[in-house]
Amino acid sequence: MHNATIKSLSVDLAARKVSSVELTRHFLKRINALKDRYNCFITVDEATSLEQAKAADALRATGRGQPLTGIPIAQKDIFCSKGWLTTCGSRMLSNFVAPYDAHVIERFNSAGAVNIGKTNMDEFAMGSSSETSYYGPVRNPWNTETVPGGSSGGSAAAVAARLTPGATGTDTGGSIRQPAALSGICGLKPTYGLVSRYGMIAFASSLDQGGPMARTAEDLALLMNVMADFDTRDSTSLEREREDYTRELAKPLTGMRIGLPKEFFAAGAAAGVMKAVDVAIAQYRKLGCETVEVSLPNMKLSVPVYYVLAPAEASSNLARYDGVRYGYRAPEYTDLTDLYKKTRGQGFGAEVKRRILIGTYVLSHGYYDAYYIQAQKIRRLIARDFTEAFKRCDVIMGPTSPTTAFRLGEKVADPVQMYLNDIYTIPANLAGLPGMSIPCGFDEKNLPVGLQIVGNYFAEAKMLQAAHQYQLATDWHQRMPAGID
Amino acid sequence: MALKLDDVKRVAHLARVAIDEAEAQAVLSQINDVFKLIAEMQAVDTREVAPMSHALDVVQRLREDTVTEADQHALFQSVAPQVEGGLYLVPKVIE
């Protein structure tokens, strides 16, 4: 049952072959047996999950079930969920029981999905390894001595270990795609503005976007049908006609033009990664696609640009954690300034503090033009590179991450090495484009490799089609880590 | 250009983050490594380029000036560290 896709579980639920209560009990049992091995959940609330499952079964019985009614979904602990501890992986929010639901949570609730638990993550989504969490590092089901990627590493590990059929993530610089790649699952970062960020704890607001994580492209499409929704409470939410993201899945790929940016294929990624990606591209040619070389000449600047813009926005967004209105408050202080400083000094972890300091510096008097404005200008150049590239192709493909999963602790002491992990994923965030990662093979250490697909604005259905057709012809997405049955 | 220890302390004060001497020392070299990476931006001529502050060119939505939120202050204050009579309590700021 835990190896079934959301799609097939949905069919079984509709046919009454299984109930949501049975399904939910099954996954809860697995979570209890395996969650300590991977440390992928921060909160599990069996009673609430089972209550939701009972309600879903009742809804199905009235004939008003939707595709996700009764399906267990794990929620990244960045989405406020009413009555649930919502920590964002931080000591600062370690006592924060959300008094309201994020829009994404409301959408899953109204679809009748079951919240199966809140997943571990890098603190405030700042990281590429899920090691900066106040709740300890997440471990990769493919090799528990390695990281699952981050920041949505708890969601990625939970899906990979078959502890949930699907999960949510958020992606500011690669936080859905990179953990999907390192954990051997699928993840989609939609076009900026498609998924409401109301109740999604903010990191860098001009880049943050929520999206689905699952084991197949078809399942991502089903999750997108629920997650993408116009919401007046998020001022960046886009008012568009509702889309059915499954509509293109069955169409063959004949004639699809795949752009291969030469910068993605230049030296830089590990040999085992490039080999798997090259084999995947060859498979796409067999499926009838044409490939064209394109160029993203400013891609190498995307990491420096990101590490100005994201910390700058984070330093502003995280100013709200003051120990006054919610969250952690230092136990001892002398005056109000001392309360703020001690609360923030104790409540934030090292990586978060580092980024707040960098962000405060680049926004401070005398440095704003040289850093922040210059970064925004180069951001435009990077976005223009994509506009040019998409004149010649339908989708862009390349590696998701330069390496497969690295060892726990390997990059923690060297932030720059950690940051360079996101070289292939950051450009899509800067441009606001949709990007996804799907499994496309393994390296010599038997660790999964991710193929990245970047589409033009609102091209999610086409990207999902490309991914689904590939998954009909290959079985990388069905491979399972050893030792999880 | 490298930051000095005093820069780290000044920025930490601006950001209202308590940081002790050892932590400031440790963070200094890491931040300077990050700024070496960031310095790669400075070589690019961007005089003719407009800053991009947002991923999509959209205009701010406006709405009717009507009340859309119900009063939920008791619920929202239920997660606050210290509240009395509907007010958030902080150390005395006016003598």
Image (tube, coloured by chain):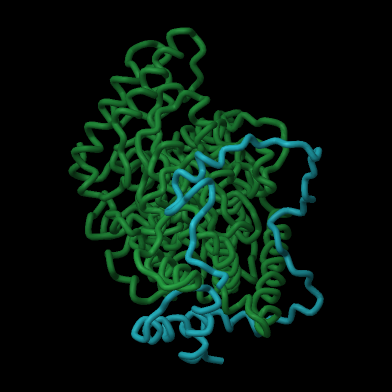
Chain colours: A green, B cyan
Number of numbered discs visible in the structure rendering: 0
Give the answer, above or below, for where A99 lies relative to A392.
above
Q: Quadrant of the N terminus of chain A?
A: top left
Nearer-the-camera pick, A9 or A395? A9
At a point 36% along the width and 53% down the height, the residue shown is A94
Q: Position of residue A129 (x, y in %)?
A: 37, 61
What's the residue at 51%, 51% (across, down)?
A201
Q: Quadrant of the C terminus of chain A?
A: top left
Examine the image and state in which quarter residue A155 appears.
top left
- Would you place residue A60 above or below residue A328 in this image? above
Image coordinates of residue A113 in percent, x first then y, are 44, 27
Asked whether residue A404 is in view, the answer is no
Residue lying at the far front of the rendered structure: B95
User: Residue A320 or A465: which is nearer the viewer?
Assistant: A320
Residue at horizontal 72%, vertical 32%?
A241
Q: Which residue sits at x=49%, y=46%?
A: B77
- Which residue sits furthest top? A62
Instruction: List x then y, in percent, for residue A229.
Output: 63, 35
